[in-house]
Each structure stands twice: as C-alpha cells, then as structure tokens.
Amino acid sequence: MIETDIIIIGAGPVGLFTVFEAGLLKLRCHLIDSLPQAGGQCSEIYPKKPIYDIPGFPSILAGELIDNLMEQAAPFKPGFTLGEAAVSIEKTVDEKFIVTTIKGTKHVAPIVMIAGGLGVFEPRKPPIDNIVDFEDKGVEYIIKDPSIYQDKVCVIAGGGDSALDWSIYLTERKIAKKVYLVHRSSSFRGHLDSVQKVIDMAGTGEINLITEAEVTGLSGADGLEKVHVTHQKDGEILIDADHFIPLFGLKPSLGPIGDWGLEIEKSAIKVNTLDYSTNIPGIYAIGDVNTYENKLKLILCGFHEGTLAVQSAFARIHPEKKNVLKYTTVNGVQGF
C-alpha cells in the first residue's frame, strides 16, 4: 500500500504542476498514469509541437514544458505509478480513499485529485480491413519521434491541423524523403495559414497533395510497402511508401472514472468552481477532465484549478491549521 497526502490521477502538465503547489504546503503527492512516462498528451501525442500560451514562454515545445514541470516538482519528491491505469476507488472508515490500478497496486490518501485530461484515448482509425496487420509495421496513428521518418516516404491522411502541421514539419525540416497528404475533400479544417502553406508547397512540388481521395488499402509482405488510394475521379492510385499516418484525431473516454459515482456531464466531471471539488467530498477534478460554466480547456486554466484545489485540500487534511498564503518570491521554494 502506497500512502501519501494527495493521490493525483493523471501525470500530465496539470497533475505535475499540482505537485509543486501541494509541495509549497508541505503536502506529499503520488501520481498514477496509464502511460509509461509522465507528461500526458504533451509527451505521448505532440512532444515536438510548440505551445504558445504558457505565461513567460512565447513558445515552448510540449516535451520541454514537461521537462520543466518535472524539474519544478522534483524538490517535493513525488511518487509515480506509471503504465497502470486507475480502475477503482473506495472510501475507508477513516475517511480516506484507496485507489487501485489495473495491476492491483493500491494507494491510500485523504485526497484524490483527478487530472486525467480528456481521459483514455483511442485513435480514430480509417475503415481499412487489414490496417491492424500493419500497426507498428509502418502504420502509426500519432507522431512521437519524427526522426523515424528520416529519408522515408510517408503518406499522411487527414484534413485537420495535425495532418497539415506534420506534413509541413516533415517536409520543411527535410526529414521525410517524400510526403503525400491525402484528404477526402478539397477543403481543409485547419488554420488558414497552414492550409495555404500546404497548397503553396504542393504548388512547388515539395508536398504531394491528393485531395478528393481516401486511403482504402494497404499491402506489403513483412511490413508496409504500398498504400492504395481511391480518387473520386482518377480511380485507384498506388503509392510506394514506408509509412502510413492517418491523423483523424483521438476518441477520448473517461474509462473507469465514469463508474466512480461522480457527477458526469457530457463525458466530463462536474465541479464546484470555488475549489474544483466534485460531488464526493475529498475528490477534486482539475484540467480538461472537468466541466463547469465557461470552462476553457487550456493548460494554464488547469494550473489555476490545481492551485485552488490544493488550498482546499490543505484545509481538509489540516482543519486545525490556518493556511497563510506565502509568496515564493519571499520564501523561496523549500523541498522535503
């Protein structure tokens, strides 16, 4: 049994910053995450993508943000249970919570903070009969490490920002030998500047843009060798390719959290904006996993929510103590 002051479910940016805020109040945290490393979506889905709305950083790569948050949390010695999804929660007779993971690891604390982002993610897969046969053999649904596409022929499918941005990135940085972008429509859903950039790059031959078409088949012996594209006018087009990357987004789901007796609205946990507490006293929900009037799903908003939740948690854990806000500019940061 792992004992701590606050169990944080979700080791993304909001969960990591909450460790820092809790540490300032001398509260220990232990984080649980189904992913094998800390960082949430920032590490798993877009570590190389820039983020522009973190205060003090005009631009910072998502992976670098996680590195900084880990460094910021380090003085407070957080514990981690990674690669194990939290599947159940139960309340003890002494008003504590036991959170158990899919591997049976048990954690106990008087406070639980759910910082699970949008929940459990599954990629939206195109309806290709044998696509599973090529997963990890040339088919990837997210780009984690762009270097694996060095000097390779890549077929990207999709019409949103991810498909546009990665097509530009792999081409501009001269990573991929050749990039094909396949989209079923002649119009795109992404930012206008990205759309125009792709069109311009297609005009110069840097990107091979195929619109009004869909990838309908894959073939190869030990791995992906050919991508079959069906064009609305030209019929079937065969592309010799090393990688097929369908970027149709991810389907979020609350997963087991949805069965814990929490008040749910539109696949998110309802909270009181006074302190981001849920309908179960002692359980809080912060970041993208929660919902309330005028909710904005921004990392910086999650930082604010975690900060206020920690203040409330301190009052629950130490009802006899008065917490006086101490500015870090005056007191510095003192770890455990």
Image: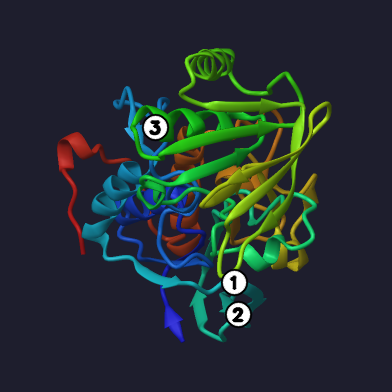
Q: Kindly identify which numbered label has been placed on residue 102.
A: 2
User: Which residue is at 71% across, 50% downward?
Assistant: 124
Q: Which badge, 2 or 3, is on the more N-terminal residue?
A: 3
Q: Is residue 38 shown left or right of residue 275? A: left
Q: CA distance from mark 2 to mark 1?
A: 6 Å
In the depicted structure, whether residue 124 falls above or below residue 207? below
SS label for mark 3:
strand
Q: Position of residue 119 (x, y in %)?
A: 64, 55
Which residue in the structure is indicated by mark 3?
50
Whether residues under marks 2 and 1 lie with C-beta atoms below 8 angstroms apart, the answer is yes
Amino acid on which disc 1 is placed: Ala
Would residue 103 be seen by someone viewing this image from the given angle? yes
SS label for mark 2:
loop
Colour mapping? rainbow
Give the quadrant of residue 120.
Answer: bottom right
Q: Disc 3 or disc 1, which is closer to the eye? A: 3
Q: Residues within 10 Å of mark 1 (few under 14, many from 20)?
A: many
Whether residues under marks 3 and 1 lie with C-beta atoms below 8 angstroms apart, the answer is no
Q: Position of residue 225 (x, y in %)?
A: 57, 56
Give the quadrant of residue 93.
Answer: bottom right
Q: Which badge, 3 or 1, is on the more N-terminal residue?
A: 3
Q: CA distance from mark 3 to mark 1?
A: 30 Å
User: Which residue is at 56% across, 54% downward?
Assistant: 140
Q: Kindly identify which numbered label has been placed on residue 86.
A: 1
User: Which residue is at 46% across, 36% downward?
Assistant: 178
SS label for mark 1:
strand
User: Which residue is at 54% across, 58% downward?
Assistant: 138
Amino acid on which disc 3 is placed: Pro
**How many callouts does the rendering have?**
3
Q: CA distance from mark 2 to mark 3?
A: 33 Å
Q: Disc 2 or disc 3, which is closer to the eye? A: 3
Amino acid on which disc 2 is placed: Ile
